[in-house]
């Protein structure tokens, strides 16, 4: 995806949040020839303030056209992430926005925890764990904070509501995806 499209998506997310807060802002002009904006894509919008997570919401599957997905997830990250209070108007000036445009997840076949560890690609793969009603994902960027495959997988299990070592026991469906990130 071209940088001009990424810049447009960042401007769109910022203007969407600004509008919801009643802050003066300007919606960016659509770049010419950006047909990708109408393609259905998985998208996450992450908000940080002074390097600290302030909201992160997205959809993994390509449910909405890219523009709509960015707008929806920008609003949800700002106002509906259950881990945080809604973004306040006075916080807006300090918000940094990151947009991750995802590939469609693919099932990762593995026969043992050793094979699972071998097949994962840190900093490249986003990972989804599913087992029964338990499900969670980490974007590829999370590898930066959780060094080591075992730590990453154990933390993802905990996030999904499983025992931290559940990934070692088999029976966990694993899917991977990649992300193009704009910040």
Image (cartoon, rainbow, N blue to C red):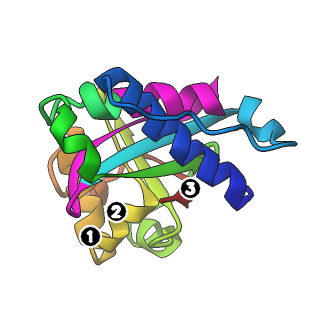
Where are the magenta residues, as a range?
Answer: 49-75
N-terminal of the pair, mark 3 or mark 1, is 1
Q: Is residue 102 visible?
A: yes
Percent x, y for residue 181? Answer: 54, 58
Helix, strand or loop at disc 1? loop
Q: Which residue is drawn at 84% across and 43% down?
A: 32
Q: Is residue 39 visible?
A: no
Q: Which residue is drawn at 29% across and 77% down?
A: 148
> Considering only vertical position in the picture, is 155 above or below 56?
below
Mark 2 nearby-residue class (10 Å; few <14, some 14–19, many ≥20): some
For label 3, the residue is 179
For label 2, the residue is 142
In the image, 73 versus 153, the foreground residue is 73
N-terminal of the pair, mark 3 or mark 2, is 2
Q: Marks 2 and 1, how far apart in space?
A: 5 Å
Q: Marks 3 and 2, how far apart in space?
A: 12 Å
Counting every numbered tag in the picture gives: 3
Q: Residue at x 77, y 40 (%)?
A: 36
For label 1, the residue is 145
Mark 3 nearby-residue class (10 Å; few <14, some 14–19, many ≥20): many
> Are circles 2 and 1 on residues that touch, CB within 8 Å?
yes
In the image, 154 versus 132, the foreground residue is 154
Residue at the front extreme of this rendering: 24
Percent x, y for residue 97? Answer: 40, 50
Left or right position of 107 against 38: left
> Are circles 3 and 2 on residues that touch, CB within 8 Å?
no
Mark 1 nearby-residue class (10 Å; few <14, some 14–19, many ≥20): few
In the image, 24 versus 13, the foreground residue is 24
Q: Marks 3 and 1, how far apart in space?
A: 17 Å
Helix, strand or loop at disc 3? strand
> Considering only vertical position in the picture, is 33 above or below 88?
below
């Amino acid at each position: 995806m071209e940088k001009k499209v990424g810049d447009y998506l960042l401007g769109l997310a910022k203007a969407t949040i600004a509008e919801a807060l009643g802050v003066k802002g300007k919606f960016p002009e659509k770049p010419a020839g950006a047909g990708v904006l109408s393609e259905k894509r998985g998208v996450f919008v992450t908000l940080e303030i002074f390097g600290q997570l302030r909201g992160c919401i997205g959809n993994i599957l390509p449910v909405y056209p890219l523009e709509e997905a960015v707008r929806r997830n920008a609003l949800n990250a700002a106002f509906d992430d259950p881990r945080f209070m809604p973004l306040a108007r006075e916080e807006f000036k300090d918000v940094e926005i990151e947009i991750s445009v995802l590939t469609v997840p693919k099932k990762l076949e593995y026969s043992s925890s050793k094979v699972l560890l071998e097949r994962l690609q840190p900093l490249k793969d986003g990972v989804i764990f599913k087992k029964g009603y338990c499900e969670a994902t980490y974007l590829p960027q999370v590898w930066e904070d959780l060094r080591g495959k075992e730590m990453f997988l154990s933390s993802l299990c905990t996030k999904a509501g499983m025992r931290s070592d559940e990934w070692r026991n088999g029976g966990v469906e694993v899917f991977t995806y990649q992300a193009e990130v704009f910040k």
